[in-house]
Image: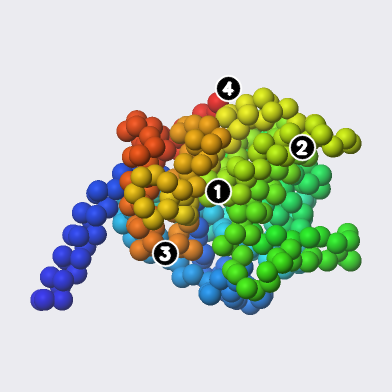
Amino acid sequence: MLLTLFYTLLLTCSTAAAMTLPKRIDVHSHFLPPFYRSALAGNGHSHPDGMPAIPSWSIDAHLSMMKTANVSKSILSISSPGTHIVVGNSTLGRHLTRECNAYAANMKKDDPERFGFWASLPLPDVELALQEIDVASSEGADGFGLMTNYHGTYVGSPALDTIFDRLNELGATVFIHPTKPCIKQGDGVNAQTIDATPFGEQYPVPIFEFFFDTARAVVNLFGSGTVDRCPNVTFIIPHSGGALPPLLTRFIQFSSVVPGGRVLDANKVREQLDKQFYFDLAGFVFDGESGGHGQLRALVEGFEISHERLLYGSDFPFTQTEFVEMFAERMKDGLEHLFSEGQRDAIYEGNAKRLLAGERDK
């Protein structure tokens, strides 16, 4: 009896805590079905990106997190290292991608009010990825979750032009997720991948290398002309842009100083950021003090990124529920210092609803 009363009180307190948090849509939320966990553990990824372990995940645990953080809908995606987890093994990549996308599609089919998904692609195998784009689209994918690089082939690489051309035809949303930075050497069967992690195992890759790789990917999307060529693609950049914001002015202006490369127009890049790019708020976007200080303030005030380009992200289960709740409380305080009530509503839900409904900025 006492145990039942304890759990009842615990549930009541948890529900009450969630009600103090604004309702939100989570665009940066991961899933790890059992077969995916097994594939990671069996192919050298039992400590993904240097993290202590593969995090546990289940549908029930995900729903519990959503209740705790007052998340009305989670858009699921596969995190790093993605679904092409062994260099050169396209067969494994194809099967694992298909299984993961089918699993997420079934979750959405069973509970469309609470779940959506960004479909994975078995890149760098372009032909298989093109096939998967069509299959995942037919299954109801809300968009596509791409890694910043695939064994050293970065988004924006000419090797992936066909993929982005197809995504542009579809008017797709592309959620970019960081992974371990790599350098590709050679082509075909002789291709090799070298980790570009100068600190080795001293620091887990997500601490800061994820931020740097996010910046590399976005710079390359602009520098390669991919953004220019794909005006119908909408990009979601995680973690408030990672290390990108301080580099914006430099990589744009530098292109007109050094001859021989693609010259970027600052006004056009600004327009593209305002129309094609969103930034999610997963992670440490506010510091530990009240007042809205930290990474997000630098982005929105330093680079004039509108509240209309911001989306909520939990990064569950790589961020466990207790920390999702802690960051949500910190975010509630931080956003109240930076934005009006109507603007906060847009960040938590309105922007994501518009994006998921396919409403594009003109």
**Disc 3 target residue:** 320
**Drawn side of residue 263 relative to residue 219, left or right:** right
Mark 1 / mark 2, whichever is N-terminal: 1
Q: Identify whether 321 is placed above or below 232.
A: below
Say what amino acid the circle numbered 1 marks.
Answer: Pro
Crowd band around label 2 with a 10 angstrom C-alpha radius: few (<14), some (14–19), many (20+): some
**Disc 1 target residue:** 238
Q: Identify whether 143 is placed above or below 39.
A: above
Residue 51, position in %: x, y? 56, 71
Crowd band around label 1 with a 10 angstrom C-alpha radius: few (<14), some (14–19), many (20+): many
| Residue 96 seen anywhere in this rendered image of the structure | yes
**Disc 2 target residue:** 254
Q: CA distance from mark 3 to mark 2?
A: 40 Å
Number of the label disc, if any, that sits on residue 362: 4
Residue 24, quarter of picture? top left
**Drawn side of residue 225 relative to residue 210, left or right:** right
Whether tag 1 and tag 4 are in contact, CB under 8 A, the answer is: no
Camera-side mark, 2 or 4? 2
Whether tag 4 and tag 3 are in contact, CB under 8 A, the answer is: no
Say what amino acid the circle numbered 2 marks.
Answer: Phe
- Please identify the quadrant where the N terminus is shown: bottom left
Q: CA distance from mark 1 to mark 2?
A: 25 Å
